[in-house]
Amino acid sequence: MTDTDPEQSADAHQPLEWRDGDMPYSPAFGDHFYCQTDGRLECGHVFLAGNGLPPRWQGKNDFLIGELGFGTGLNFGETWRQWKLSRAIGQQLHFMSFELYPMRRAEIDRALSHWREIDAERHALAAAWPETPEGTVSLRLDDQTVLSVVCGRALDGVAASEAGFDAWYLDGFAPSRNADMWSTELMRRVYEKTIPGGTFATYAAAGFVRRNLIAAGFAVERRSGFAGKREMLCGIKA
Ligand SMILES: C[S@@+](CC[C@H](N)C(=O)[O-])C[C@H]1O[C@@H](n2cnc3c(N)ncnc32)[C@H](O)[C@@H]1O
């Protein structure tokens, strides 16, 4: 897998294949970026509901979501859409994602154009997205929403970030195809940066992922997965 060697420079670009016109696939990781049924609905079921969102936004002045794997920005786009529907005046959302191979603007635009529901978010994201994403891309997308994409290995980015995450989207490709994004060390760092009462959610259900999350300190729960998937995991830092 030389194309996806995590030791490669952070500005490396991941070659994509496109299936059915707008569905990106990573030949290097041998995986799709989201489920083939409907990635936007999957995001709502797994990442938002799995973290108790939108209800947990209520009454919080500031809310920080961490994501492992920005990919196309679909999770961000759907989260931003739901945030705009439920936020109150003065509340702030910061969505911070960690990504080794940031996509190009045209790739983000192509993938997200699949969903008319997030047209507004796609246009705004594509307009603000830099030509050459590097370092930390920080975008104030509206007066209540900031997106940061920390380019580089998630382990390094999370280790270097300040604590204070309210919720995590663990979205690093299938554990069998990218064990790095589910390692003991990374799950330990995720836990360390989470506030007490903070949560995570993921579509993954692999035994080693569950064990790593438990070893890190999370109370882990199994729930029904999206679209017939038997299980997913979510949990809380008690
Ligand atoms: C399943 S995709 C994420 C999908 C994304 N959340 C979305 O909404 O489109 C997994 C992402 O993790 C990234 N990735 C893989 N290994 C990584 C690593 N070690 N550190 C940071 N990002 C990594 C890949 O480049 C890919 O974009």
Image (tube, rainbow, N blue to C red):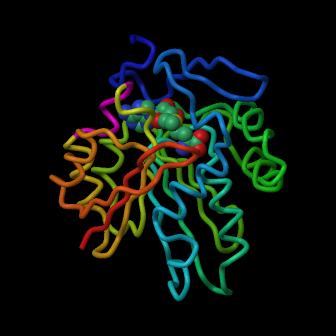
Residue 154: image quadrant is top left
Q: Which residues are magenta?
A: 177-183
* Any part of residue 101 in sight: yes
Is residue 182 shown in magenta?
yes
In x, y percent, where is residue 116? Answer: 84, 49
The relative height of residue 102 versus residue 216 in the rendered view (above or below) is above
Classify the position of the N terminus by image quarter.
top left
Q: Residue at x 36, y 46 (%)?
A: 157
* Drawn side of residue 47 relative to residue 121, left or right: left
Q: Nearer the viewer, residue 156 or 40?
A: 40
In x, y percent, where is residue 38? Answer: 68, 42
In x, y percent, where is residue 186? Answer: 26, 45
The relative height of residue 200 versus residue 57 in the rendered view (above or below) is above
Residue 25: image quadrant is top right
* Any part of residue 152 in sight: no
Q: Residue at x 75, y 31 (%)?
A: 106
Q: Nearer the viewer, residue 121 or 78?
A: 78
Residue 145: image quadrant is bottom right
* Drawn side of residue 69 relative to residue 123, left or right: left
* Drawn side of residue 227 relative to residue 158, left or right: right
Q: Residue at x 56, y 34 (%)?
A: 102
Q: How many numbered circles does the render carry?
A: 0
The relative height of residue 121 versus residue 198 in the rendered view (above or below) is above
Is residue 206 shown in magenta?
no
